[in-house]
Image (tube, rainbow, N blue to C red):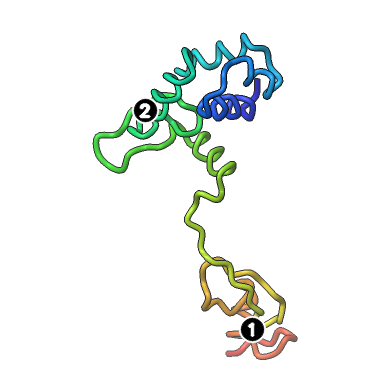
């Protein structure tokens, strides 16, 4: 079983599906799915399992990616993920959940190429070398100002 299959099992189990249905959807045997679910706290009857997992997820007691237990720190903000690996994997599969800034399409003041500026409408240059050449060099032939 790979990470994608494990994530799919967790998602399907949270949606209220049984072991056999999940096994057919993922392409694994029912026993593998059942053993994985029991090892990760998703065993038992579906209705009770889903309610229990949702309550633990809302309380911040389990990782939102893999479902493992999380020990919350004494101070600081509460954790949502058990590890950096889970955090990166979850954000890779859920990019729509982020607070994204606007992407502006601009034209470089030096070279005239079109570029995308992420969240900064005031940007004028496509790169640092274009900024340096436009600000400190006289011509395109490379004569530098003194």
Q: Kindly identify which numbered label has been placed on residue 91.
A: none
> Which mark's residue is nearer the viewer, 1 or 2?
2
Task: Tell me which corner region of the image, top left, top right, bottom left or bottom right, holds residue 10.
Answer: top right
Q: Is residue 104 above or below residue 16?
A: below
Q: In the visual, does 63 lie left or right of 93?
A: left
Query: Where is mark 2, residue-wise?
Result: 56
**Residue at 55% over, 11% down:** 35
Query: Where is mark 1, residue-wise?
Result: 109
Q: Is residue 105 above or below residue 93?
A: below
Outermost residue toward the right? 141
Q: In the visual, does 28 lie left or right of 9?
A: right
Query: Earlier along the polypeptide chain: callout 1 or callout 2?
Result: 2
The x, y position of residue 135, in whole percent, is: 58, 85
**Residue at 32% over, 39% down:** 78
Q: Is residue 146 above or below residue 9?
A: below
Q: Is residue 12 above or below residue 141?
A: above
**Residue at 63% over, 15% down:** 20
| Dot 1 alpha-carbon crowd within 10 angstroms: few under 14, some 14 to 19, many 20 or more | some
Task: Tell me which corner region of the image, top left, top right, bottom left or bottom right, holds residue 4.
Answer: top right
Q: Quadrant of the C terminus?
A: bottom right
| Dot 2 alpha-carbon crowd within 10 angstroms: few under 14, some 14 to 19, many 20 or more | some
Q: Quadrant of the N terminus?
A: top right
Outermost residue toward the top? 31
The residue tagged with tag 2: helix, strand or loop?
helix
Q: CA distance from mark 1 to mark 2?
A: 53 Å
Between 136 and 68, the one nearer to me in the picture: 68
Outermost residue toward the left? 74
Between 137 and 19, the one nearer to me in the picture: 19
The x, y position of residue 105, in whole percent, is: 63, 73
């Amino acid at each position: 079983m790979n990470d994608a299959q494990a994530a799919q099992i967790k998602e399907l189990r949270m949606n209220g599906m049984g072991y056999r249905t999940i096994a057919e959807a993922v392409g694994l045997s029912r026993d593998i799915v059942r053993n994985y679910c029991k090892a990760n706290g998703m065993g038992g009857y579906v209705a009770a399992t889903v309610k229990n997992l949702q309550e633990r997820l809302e309380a911040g007691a389990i990782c939102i990616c893999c479902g493992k237990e999380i020990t919350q720190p004494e101070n600081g903000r509460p954790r949502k993920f058990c590890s950096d690996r889970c955090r990166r994997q979850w954000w890779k599969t859920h990019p729509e959940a982020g607070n994204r800034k606007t992407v502006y399409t601009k034209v470089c003041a030096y070279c005239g190429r079109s570029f995308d500026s992420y969240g900064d409408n005031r940007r004028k240059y496509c790169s640092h070398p274009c900024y340096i050449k436009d600000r400190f060099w006289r011509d395109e032939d490379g004569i530098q100002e003194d």
